Image (cartoon, helix red, strand yellow):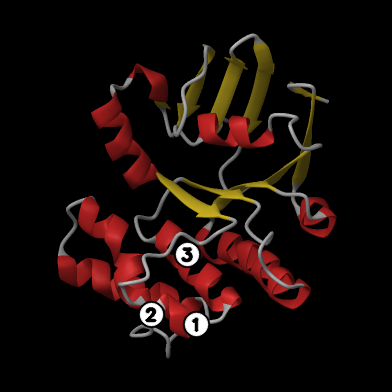
Amino acid sequence: MVPLLSATNLQRSYGTLPVLRDINLTIATGEIVSIVGASGAGKSTLLHILGTLDRPDAGQVRLAGQDVFTLNDKQLARFRNEKIGFVFQFNNLLPEFTALENVCLPGFIAGKPEREVRQRAKMLLETLGLPDRTDHFPSQMSGGEQQRTAVARALINQPAVVFADEPSGNLDSHNAEELHKLFFRLRDEFGQTFIIVTHNEMLADLADRKVTIRDGLIG
């Protein structure tokens, strides 16, 4: 079976410091994969390259049949918006927009019909337990609610994969556990694929597969 995502011989250095050295990885559709390792091991660098936020010095990434780094910056930005969702440690919600407006933004950027985008955004917020928060601004929501809104935003364009970088790192233990459960429910309900960089051992161990990076290599 053709993998949803494959990385082949990825290398990345910053100056003379090698951060990734010949990384090979495949991810199947509907898989939840955690990436763990010590600080500075290269986890976030790998996530940013797989998510097309950064380019490798060498190697290839194929996602949903596309050799992503053959695209120019404009094409890559469009591909990223349509095929990839992101959830970061800090939710990056725009404070002047409501929850619904924040969730809708990637859909509007993709040029999708406004009515269709709004309907999907409302459905996602309801699915994520936030039906009463659509008109609330981020400052009016708890940390857990803000992060669930960020997850809804990541899902608005029905991405092939969602990358999460320390998604529960800014949450208390209860909200972190709820967020972790949510990822698995979204996989079960939508067949969603998740690749998660985390220091949270509980989340890492729950994943279908745990990938450990040491000194820029997959151990």
Closest to the camera, between mark 3 and mark 2, is: 2
Closest to the camera, between mark 1 and mark 3, is: 1
Mark 2 burial class by Cα count in 10 Å: few <14, some 14-19, many 20+: some
Residue 104, given in percent of the width and then of the height, sits at 29, 66
Question: Does dot 2 land on a helix, a strand or a loop?
Answer: loop
Is 47 left, or right, of 134 in this rendering?
right
Q: Is residue 23 above or below residue 45?
A: above
Name the residue at 60% across, 75% down: 144
| Residue matched to label 3 | 150
- Amino acid type for the residue under numbered disc 3: Ala
Is 80 left, or right, of 91 in this rendering?
left
Q: Is residue 32 above or below residue 174?
A: above
Front-most of residues 142 and 85: 142
Cβ–Cβ under 8 Å for marks 1 and 2: yes
Image quarter (top left, top right, bottom left or bottom right) of the C terminus: top right
Where is residue 39, by image quadrant?
top right
Question: Does dot 1 land on a helix, a strand or a loop?
Answer: loop
Name the residue at 50% across, 63% down: 151
The numbered mark at residue 137 is: 2
Q: Residue furthest front?
A: 15
Is 20 left, or right, of 200 in this rendering?
left
| Residue matched to label 1 | 141
Mark-to-mark CA distance, 3 and 2: 13 Å
Where is residue 18, by image quadrant?
top right
Q: Is residue 192 above or below residue 8?
A: below
Mark 3 burial class by Cα count in 10 Å: few <14, some 14-19, many 20+: many
Question: Does dot 3 land on a helix, a strand or a loop?
Answer: helix
Q: Earlier in the sequence, mark 1 or mark 3?
A: 1
Residue 120, given in percent of the width and then of the height, sits at 32, 70
